[in-house]
Image (spheres, rainbow, N blue to C red):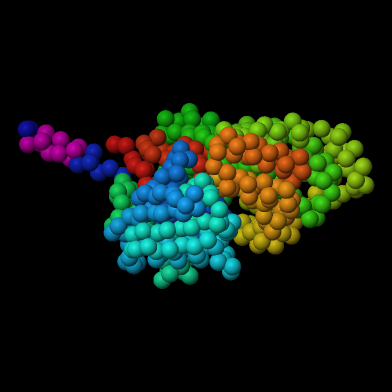
Amino acid sequence: MLTRSVAVLALTATTALAQQTDITIGMQLEPPNLDPTGGAAAAIDEVVYANVFEGLTRFGPDGSVQPALARSWQTGGDGRVWTFTLAQGVTFHDGTPFDAADVAFSLNRARAEDSTNAQKALFDGIESVEAVDPHTVRITLAEPNGNFGFNLAWGDAVIVAPESADTNATQPVGTGPFKLAQWVQGDRVELVANPDYWGEAPALTAATFKFISDPNAAFAAMMAGDIDAFPVFPAPETLASFAADPRFEVIVGSTEGETILAMNNKALSDVRIRQAITHAIDRQAIIDGAMFGYGTPIGTHFAPHNPDYVDLTAGSAHDPEKARALLAEAGAEDLTLRLMLPPPSYARRGGEIIASQLREVGIQTEVTNLEWAQWLEQVFRGKDFDMTIVSHTEPADINIYARPEYYFQYDNAAFQALMDKIGVTSDAAMRSELLAQAQRIIADDYVNGYLFQLAKTGVADARIQGLWENAPTQANDLTGVSWSE
């Protein structure tokens, strides 16, 4: 009897020690490729940011800028010269050593004339990148930029190797704690822990990103245990069911996602028409109908949780009568516009509501549902649209309005000059005032219809620890994730 008891205790102890070390993450959208330096889709970073690829700096879960491949840095030359001390003993997943030459290659590639980087403007201020020695990089800027460390934390600024840069879209090779095992297109991406990782090893040994576009299928997969966590759950109407089930934890936080009714400012060049469209929109009805109450109304392209946010929602308040008057003044009572909708439920559901609201003021819409690759090709790159709905999840990205070639094609020289001034201003109070001016300019120009700040509504197995509550950048950072016993 004693021997049997000891055996049972040993078995129990062995079972307790066999803690789960793999995880399956649900995502609604599949990335079009896996190279964050060559694509605009948020889904790319949601798979690879901090997991597969690393930059000189990185965002922490609280939005702070933290060391990554650069262990420290200092500025000199009146804020124009940044010197980075790099981590040592780092290799890429293919065994290629990492050093300062890779940093120079990556940043020069990102800012090159023929660069395909979606955020090329992040690197415009770089005058030169010098590999001082294998572990030291000196970057000289054309003008001081106190925000440069922040810029380098974006997924678009990760460091790649010249040996593998051209094939990262399908075979990503980074320096991160996980490396690609396989990508089954249309279904999943599988990562495994990098045994040669230079930093602290993650608790997880494997991670699968499973792509489920249908909200009903996502609900069924979570309930069946096929998915361990769905950090941005596509069916907010079902969150109450998960909250009532002790197997799950509902994680509600904030994101950097300004959800907008983007307008083609060349096709809709009359500000009165854009203003009419914004006054036709009932933001709260969209939040309630498309997001089941999750979301914060916004009146400009700026996150409400940012201390520099200015509440400008009153300037584009729901006012159908004013919308009709503006359309009549512009001679556009019989307007028909094309509304192109990408796959996310906020866009598809929100598009139905907005089409109805526009119809009430006399604007007809031709609604077209696009797959993500189609949206990127036709709307983002081709600029062939009148209106679209999308969440801009990049951090603090009001600077996109200073880029006339950007997909909504807003061209305002005064705004561009203001953003240049912000870029060289280090005084916090002055930066706050300038950012307030920037918010007011785009709100007063009715560049886009500003809808709501996207909430981060996630569901996870209650035993999982370390998932981000908020989303200071578009990422599913697994470096601190583990299972409780």
Q: Position of residue 463 (x, y in %)?
A: 36, 36
Per the rendered image, the range of residues in magenta is: 3-13
Q: Position of residue 75 (x, y in %)?
A: 44, 49
Residue at the farthest left position: 2
Residue 318 visible from this viewpoint? yes
Tell me if 108 is positioned left or right of 102 in this view.
Answer: right
Quadrant where the C terminus sits is top left
Residue 389 visible from this viewpoint? no
Quadrant where the N terminus sits is top left
- Residue depicted at 55% across the width and 53% down the height: 143
- Residue depicted at 60% across the width and 37% down the height: 430
Query: Residue 11 in magenta?
Result: yes
Q: Position of residue 167 (x, y in %)?
A: 47, 69
Which image quadrant is residue 318 in? top right
Marker count (numbered): 0
Q: Nearer the viewer, residue 125 or 161?
A: 125
Tell me if 230 is positioned left or right of 94 in this view.
Answer: right
- Residue depicted at 57% across the width and 64% down the height: 116
Which image quadrant is residue 135 in? bottom left
Residue at the farthest front position: 77
Q: Nearer the viewer, residue 172 or 398?
A: 398
Query: Residue 293 in magenta?
Result: no
* Magenta-drawn stretch, dominant element (helix, strand or loop): helix
Q: Position of residue 369 (x, y in %)?
A: 69, 53
Residue at the farthest top position: 244
- Residue depicted at 70% across the width and 36% down the height: 299
Which image quadrant is residue 370 in? bottom right
